[in-house]
Amino acid sequence: MKNLNKLHALIALAFMTLFVISCDFEGITDDVDIQISNNILKQEALISVLDIVNPESIEGANKLTVELIGNDADKFVTNSGENISNLKVIDGNISLAVNPNFSNSEDLKVLLKIKGENFLTTTIPVIIGANDTLVTKSINIVNKLNTVEGVDFLETTKTLSNNSINENYIITTPKTKATTNTEITIESGTVFQDANGNNISGANLKSEIAHFSLDTPEAIASFPGGLTPLSVIDETGEETEDIAFITAGFTSIDMFVDGKEVKNFSKPISVSIEIPNNYINPETGNNISEGDLIPIWSYGEDGQWGFHKTGTVTMNTSGNYNIVFTTTHLSWYNLDYYYRGCNYSRKLTVSIPKTPSLSDNFNNLSYDLVYAHNGQVIANRDIQISKTKDNSNGYYRTPNQNLKIKLYSGSRYDSNRVLLYTSDTFDGCSNNTINIDGSTFSNSIPPKPDVRNINIQFQAKCGDKVLNPFLYLYRQESYTYYGRTYAYWRYVGYTYAGKGYIYNAHIGVSQKYKVYFGGNSYEYDYTFNSDNIIIGDFEAPGDLCNRLF
């Protein structure tokens, strides 16, 4: 009975959303059951932001902020139907929806810019197609105080004389977590300027440099904006969409004079970004060498990648390959070969048909989409393998390159996951489906606890009025990263029209669940002892009914 009451309460949290966006109920008759639902938003996006090493650092509603950028930004609302200016990031989760006035009319594109104290600003492009109902995406954010493996962050302070430096000033990232580095040289006499070119007066220069190596998938996954931007400004000055990057290195550079942001310099500064000596040039298929050319891209305040110049690979005094270039303005800088992506309407599907030989009913797996020539991770997703059910998901707008799928046991965030399968090479724009035969590796999947998908049926009423809340459910999940276990909130199911569906619940184990709505979160512990729960008619809380009617 105690668990049943808790489940009633969890569902009741969803009922609260009915009050927030309910229509005018005047004139409702009382002689029949009236179906009341909050499902007026037909297209939604759930975005998860994760600090892999410090997930607790983004818990709550005031750790991160989000801004929508782009021509379609005003076509979105919060998941409670409010103006998008009220959008919040809670526990790293963002829930937004398409304004019903624009739903299903056209593909909508928007860039989410996410900021927070002690975090590197990052962006994530979101596309909701005209036929999409739910889009889910995830992105890593870098904590300056404790970065993921493969990313070094350095903060330095330099005393100024007459608002400039009186000697050459060299800043080099330390190679603590990355095997490559960034080096910046500022010439003596350089004056620091704001975005409008005005000289900045001050006594101290603070520099913040983040160097992203290619050492780990986590470092590559933390690149702000990812490797598939909505568009770029190419070398001809034209905006080009459907682009995919193959990166050779990335650096983020921020400077401040007594708290005032530096954007320009009176003299060009020099930036050197090292490249792994074993990096494969995708243009030639050979190891990188001196004289190779790599495009350099800079990032604008509007979230737009733009062509900066072409860099030439040289060898530095440490015997490492690098690209050295000059600039008079600060930005993120990325060394990237780029290629056209496939048309957005075309989807690459990864399919694992039902596998009767599986020892469990299902297992949780994950896979990486990688470039075939160097194994660089483009994106990754979780997927299930089941004894009785076909499973599939995939990607829109994959790069027009030779690709592979690498399938692992465990979550994509788990550093201990085990490689189970690698696909043959396929063309990103020609292959529509990658079918994976689970019987070839099912015996290699590590055993798991009793985990099941939960079906719930319920009918909640306020007198003769039936409530049908529609909401997405989250659960606190855990993963292991370099020997430590971390927790985060993850989308795991929904309630709709008197039914609920929750993925991968641990049977007999108390787990924490949440719903997010209208800038708030509601949490409950619950233990499922069965995978099929039927709740008869029950009355919603009286105070809620009074507020609704």
Image (spheres, rainbow, N blue to C red):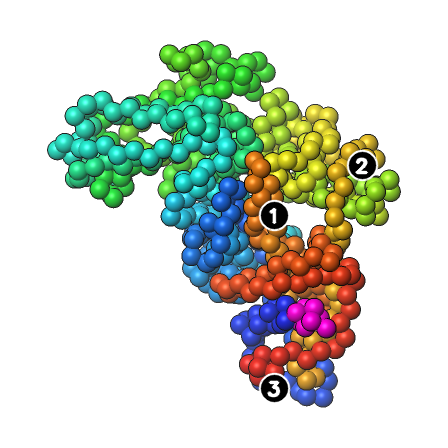
Please name the amino acid that badge 2 sits on: Ser
Q: Pinpoint residue 132: horizontal percent, then vertical percent.
A: 64, 52
Say few, some or many: other residues with alpha carbon within 10 Å of mark 1 (under 14 / 14 to 19 / 20 or more): some
Sequence-wise first label, 3 or 2 = 3
Please name the amino acid that badge 3 sits on: Gly
Depth check, front residue: 243 or 19:
19
Q: Residue under circle 2?
A: 442
Q: Pinpoint residue 362: horizontal percent, then vertical percent.
A: 78, 46
Q: Nearer the viewer, mark 2 or mark 1?
A: 1
Depth check, front residue: 274 or 200:
274
The number of discs equals 3
Please name the amino acid that badge 1 sits on: Ser
Q: Is residue 407 left or right of residue 98?
A: right
Q: Quadrant of the N terminus?
A: bottom right
Element on which disc 3 rests: loop
Q: Main secondary structure of the magenta part?
A: helix
Q: Is residue 509 left or right of residue 193?
A: right
- Above or below 360: residue 7: below
Q: Quadrant of the C terminus?
A: bottom right
- Which numbered tag is attached to residue 478? 1
Q: Are marks 3 and 2 in contact (CB under 8 Å)?
A: no
The residue at 16%/25% (across/down) is 166
Depth check, front residue: 366 or 403:
366
The residue at 46%/32% (across/down) is 151
Q: Is residue 242 magenta?
A: no
The residue at 84%/48% (across/down) is 388
Q: Nearer the viewer, mark 3 or mark 2?
A: 2
- Which numbered tag is attached to residue 27? 3
Q: Pinpoint residue 456: horizontal percent, then vertical percent.
A: 74, 64
Q: Which residues are magenta?
A: 1-8
